[in-house]
Image (spheres, grey):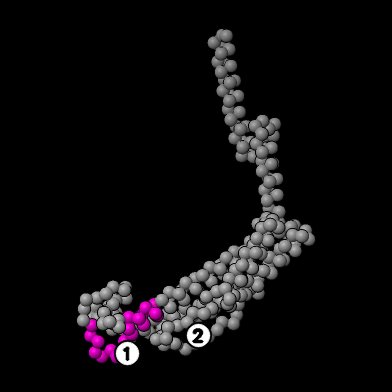
Amino acid sequence: MEPDTQQIQAARNAQERKQNLDDYNNEMAGRDTGRMKRFGFEDKRKIEQKEKRKREKTLQDLLLNAEYLAAWNAATDAVNSAQRAVYDVLIKTRDDLTIAEKNHAELLSRAITLEDGRKVFLDDDGSIYGENGHKLQIEAPMHGHPHAPSWQDFKDSRDHLIKADQNYDDVAEKDSRLQEIYDALHDEHAGLSIEDLNALKDEAIGIEISVQPANSATLEVSAPESSVLEDAIPNITSAPNHFL
């Protein structure tokens, strides 16, 4: 091949490589150049769009099916019932926790306080303990503190507070989970199957059962006898929007 011919062929090869690269980039980006598609991106893109539309089948479309509608209604009813039950217990456990916090604060206010600010408590055997449970090798000024709480009083109050806090957190977690289930049921594009709906319904029923008096310790949290009860906390009469 003559030198001039070689240069012309090399230029053509370079131009062809550039055109191939341009076509590849344009097709990958979905740009219409008027040229015939060469790399199969368009077919792949159509398949992906079809799958996306299938995944995004709306809730309204699904509810046109009688069997699906029945399962969705059953799940929704179960969630609404569980939310009402959990809400009632949530208010009670919140009030229990508030009272426990006030009672513990009142007990600490009557405790013997050392010069460095530490609260100390006298056991029945004469031992002295700090709030952290460590036994202290000191002589506590007991005179002038006839109503100071004992070490047992402190432990009872602390344990009651911990239990009240755990109860509230447990019910609050169940309330949060029910809200997640509610949101999933009303998500236009969740694409839940009938099996999914039944599973969510069963979960909601289980949550409601778990907060009923016979199955939950959260409804009966007795304050220690040494606690001084504060005025009753007003009840909340309005429910959250998602319960209505």
Locate residue 182: give its quadrant. bottom right
Residue under the image location 30 percent in, 81 percent down? 123
Residue under the image location 71 percent in, 58 percent down? 194
Residue underneath mark 2: 233
Q: Which is nearer the eye, 44 or 123? A: 123
Q: Amino acid at mark 1?
A: His
Residue under the image location 69 percent in, 34 percent down? 34
Q: Is residue 237 visible?
A: yes
Locate residue 238: give its quadrant. bottom right
Q: Quadrant of the N terminus?
A: top right
Magenta span of residues: 140-158
Q: Earlier in the sequence, mark 1 or mark 2?
A: 1
Q: Position of residue 152 (x, y in %)?
A: 35, 81
150 within the magenta span? yes
Badge 1 crowding class, 10 Å Cα cut-off, few under 14, some 14 to 19, many 20 or more, is few
Locate residue 187: give its quadrant. bottom right
Describe the element under mark 2 as helix, strand or loop.
Answer: loop
Residue underneath mark 1: 147
Residue under the image location 74 percent in, 59 percent down? 68
Describe the element under mark 1 as helix, strand or loop.
Answer: loop
Q: Position of residue 121 (x, y in %)?
A: 30, 81
Image disc number at residue 86: none
